[in-house]
Image: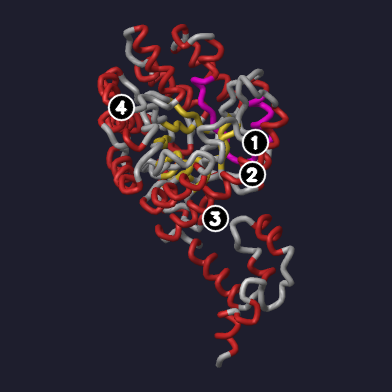
Amino acid sequence: MKTQLTEARRGNLTEQALEVSRSERMPPAMLIKAISDGKIVIPVNKKRRGAFKAVGIGGGLRTKVNANIGSSPQRSDTKEELKKLNVAIEAGADAVMDLSIGEDIDENRVQIIESCPRPLGTVPIYQAAREAGDTADFGIKGFLNVLKRQAEDGVDFVTIHSGITRGALPLLEKRLMGVVSRGGSMLIRWMRQSGDENFLYQHYDDILSIAAEYDLTLSLGDGLRPGCIDDATDEAQLHELRVLGELAGRARDAGVQVMIEGPGHVPLGQITENVRLEKEYCKDAPFYVLGPLPTDIAAGYDHFAGAIGGAVAAAAGADFLCYLTPREHIGLPDADDVREGVVLARIAAHIGDIEKNVSGAVEKDRKMSLARSKRDWNEMAKYVIDPQRYLELIGGEEQNDICSMCGELCAVKIYGESG
């Protein structure tokens, strides 16, 4: 068996690891050690074909950004999802997840994979539940069937909700909002109706077997993530996090790459502690966070609120930010929402990278500052996170050595001419 993890433990630099080493300016030996220790993952399925850019996620690397796309039962249009995919990649997303639950899930996924030059992730339990017809009727057999098919198609990483166990159920009674994870709620209903333990926990070794075969990276889902700041960092969330730490260790022992998903709605003052706890319980596994959202009342602007929380999380050591769009908590995002969400998440990631002193992060800001001091508008366009928006706004300016804000009273101009 060969996976990115087992090859690193043998001291071998894979083609994808070499690409990551070069793009991140991390010495090969350092990268191999981090992959071996489970601190960095490179999601790439052995079945992957066509144009593909390897992406490393974890400590010491640039904070990455994921964009979610996917159909719903109300809106199921593969062409629209492919449009969202292209917009996400053009806006700078490092990875994409297909969360489709609409019609023709398999065909939709195949077309997205063929068109996606970045790591592509899924949440297999969604399709397993759709095919079962009712969550009360699904189980490990149907789930493994879906997982195998998705792996065979070339999916690079998968969210697996194996950390929810019956031991956490009583802890949920204290919550204001209960469970907001789609996969988490499905499994909890199944456990309550069947009286059995979570089949994704009981049959975790079977999941690991498929993951090792295809070199699927497991993204252990936070099915009990808080859905409001009132529920943040509670006993139920921490119970699951401890189980995820156990499961991460078992994945590494099986030669399977693993990262951990995190909250969710978390007050600003608790975000750093949430990152610290994940790194402690999960032995520095890459941390993949949704937001986090430090307020519950930003509907319509959750991408801004999430960027604030994401910047704090990234600065504290989070490795992978899942974007939010203006339609979070409202409805299915369109292509414009996707683009805006990616840009905001990239800004948050870069702010975090400056604080973490990631190689090359501050350098970009210095180059931008130098271009601004010279009022070199064309040079500035090379360093802005969103060149498209920058060029749209500057199109109405004269683009000489002053702008319409201050005119001849430009502070930079006055200072530069003063001596």
In the figure, is residue 70 to the left or right of 218? right
Determine whether the residue tagged by mark 1 lies in a helix, strand or loop.
loop
Q: How far is disc 4 from disc 1 in space, using C-alphas?
A: 32 Å
* Marks 3 and 2, how far apart at CA: 20 Å
Q: Which callout, 2 or 1, points at the residue further toward the start of the chain?
A: 2
Range covered by the magenta-colored residues: 108-126
Residue 278: quarter of image: top left
Q: Earlier in the sequence, mark 2 or mark 4?
A: 2
Looking at the image, do the residues carrying marks 2 and 1 touch, with CB atoms under 8 Å apart?
Answer: no
Residue 334 is marked as 1
> Mark 1 vs mark 3: which is more N-terminal?
3
Q: Residue at x 54, y 49 (%)?
A: 344
Disc 1 to disc 3, C-alpha distance: 34 Å
Amino acid type of disc 1? Asp
Q: Which mark is residue 175?
A: 4
Q: Earlier in the sequence, mark 3 or mark 2?
A: 3
User: Residue 170: where, in percent of width, then height?
Assistant: 25, 19
Mark nearer the viewer, 2 or 4: 4
Which of label 4 and label 3 is nearer to you? 4
Side of 404 relative to 258 (left or right): right
Is residue 231 shown left or right of residue 322?
left
- Asked where in the image residue 417 lies, by quadrant, the reply is bottom right
